[in-house]
Image (spheres, rainbow, N blue to C red):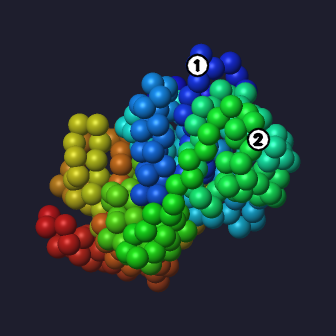
């Protein structure tokens, strides 16, 4: 999959394009990608996704951004398995925000779009002035067609990134998995921490979350995968670590009965069950006692 940073850069040939934020890459997003790939196969053209960094709402609501389901690395890994030929990541900032609907349509034409696939409720242009149906009406003048995709229901309701966020915040991982088409997970490269966990019998792999706001916090039963192992059981904390005066949001995963060096390795942590909130304890001894209870509960849940 080729990474592109500008839509108006020279393209070697026409393409099929799908556009959106695609946070979480849930089942609705998957239908858009599948439709784009089908058009691409029919026309003998490459398929390209156009998306944004930061996500538009992160730029427009800096004081209260939405929880991010997938950071860029996670999206890239998921998309690399879809068959898309190109991923165009546009920097969302003042220039793109002020672009009119007409200017954005012209940009798609300059990118040599032959077919554009979007959700029926997609809006774009300054202040969301242009609707998907407006784009479809304008497209013929610019040499491309538009395929409007209907909403995708899951559990009787339209699937959306917002619904996935709500399910994750409530610890409803089975519901989130039905909307995502997979278990919810986070990826990161293990970095060196203060090794405090090792001193209390709970060594952890520390993964930065690489997002301004997370969709869930607390302590969880998890399964952890790496390049050379799959789905090892464990317990993880996602939070700011108030007992050690932490400030940064960090994912700390303790793998059961595992003692290999993980520093610098990329891991994927799948959330299975939410055990409890992140708490402040009266003492370190009380915290360690609770951690033992958490580990025992996670072992029972995971059959470990």
Q: Quadrant of the C terminus?
A: bottom left
From the image, tell me which residue sits under label 2.
Answer: 104
Q: Nearer the viewer, residue 207 or 225?
A: 225
Q: Which residue is drawn at 49% across and 49% down?
A: 32
Q: How far apart are marks 2 and 1 (CA)?
A: 19 Å
From the image, tell me which residue sits under label 1.
Answer: 13
**What kind of element bears circle 1?**
loop
In the rendered image, the residue lying farthest to the bottom is: 282
Q: Whole-percent x and y of residue 3?
A: 56, 28
The answer to whether any part of residue 33 appears in the image is yes
Q: Image quadrant of residue 298?
A: bottom left
Above or below: residue 41 compared with residue 157:
above
In the rendered image, the residue lying farthest to the top is: 12
Q: How crowded is mark 1: few (under 14 residues within 10 Å), some or many (20 or more)?
A: few
- Mark 2 or 1 closer to N-term? 1
Q: Nearer the viewer, residue 46 or 232?
A: 46
Q: Whole-percent x and y of residue 220?
A: 35, 69
- Marks counted in the figure total 2
Q: Whole-percent x and y of residue 52?
A: 65, 44
Q: Kindly identify which numbered label has been placed on residue 163.
A: none
């Amino acid at each position: 999959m080729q990474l592109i940073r500008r839509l108006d850069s020279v393209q070697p040939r026409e393409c099929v394009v799908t556009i959106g934020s695609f946070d979480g890459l849930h089942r609705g997003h998957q239908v858009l990608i599948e439709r784009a790939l089908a058009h691409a196969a029919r026309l003998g053209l490459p398929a390209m996704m156009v998306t944004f960094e930061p996500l538009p709402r992160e730029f427009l609501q800096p004081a209260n951004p939405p929880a991010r389901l997938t950071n860029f690395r996670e999206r890239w890994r998921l998309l690399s398995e879809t068959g898309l030929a190109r991923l165009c990541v546009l920097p969302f900032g003042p220039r793109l925000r002020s672009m009119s609907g007409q200017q954005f349509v012209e940009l798609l034409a300059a990118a040599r779009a032959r077919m554009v696939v979007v959700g029926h409720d997609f809006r774009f242009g300054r202040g969301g002035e242009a609707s998907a149906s407006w784009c479809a009406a304008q497209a013929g003048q610019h040499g491309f067609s538009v395929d409007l995709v209907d909403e995708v229901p899951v559990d009787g309701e339209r699937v959306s990134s917002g619904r996935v966020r709500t399910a994750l915040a409530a610890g409803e991982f089975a519901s989130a998995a039905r909307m995502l088409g997979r278990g919810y997970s986070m990826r990161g490269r293990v970095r060196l921490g203060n090794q405090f966990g090792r001193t209390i019998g709970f060594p952890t792999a520390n993964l930065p979350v690489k997002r301004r706001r997370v969709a869930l916090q607390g302590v969880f039963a998890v399964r952890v995968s790496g390049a050379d192992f799959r789905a090892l059981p464990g317990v993880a904390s996602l939070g700011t670590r108030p007992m050690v005066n932490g400030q940064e949001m960090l994912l700390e995963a303790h793998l059961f009965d595992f003692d290999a060096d993980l520093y610098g390795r990329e891991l994927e942590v799948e959330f299975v069950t939410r055990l409890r909130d992140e708490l402040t304890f009266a003492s370190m001894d009380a915290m360690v006692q609770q951690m033992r209870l958490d580990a025992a509960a996670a072992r029972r849940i995971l059959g470990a």
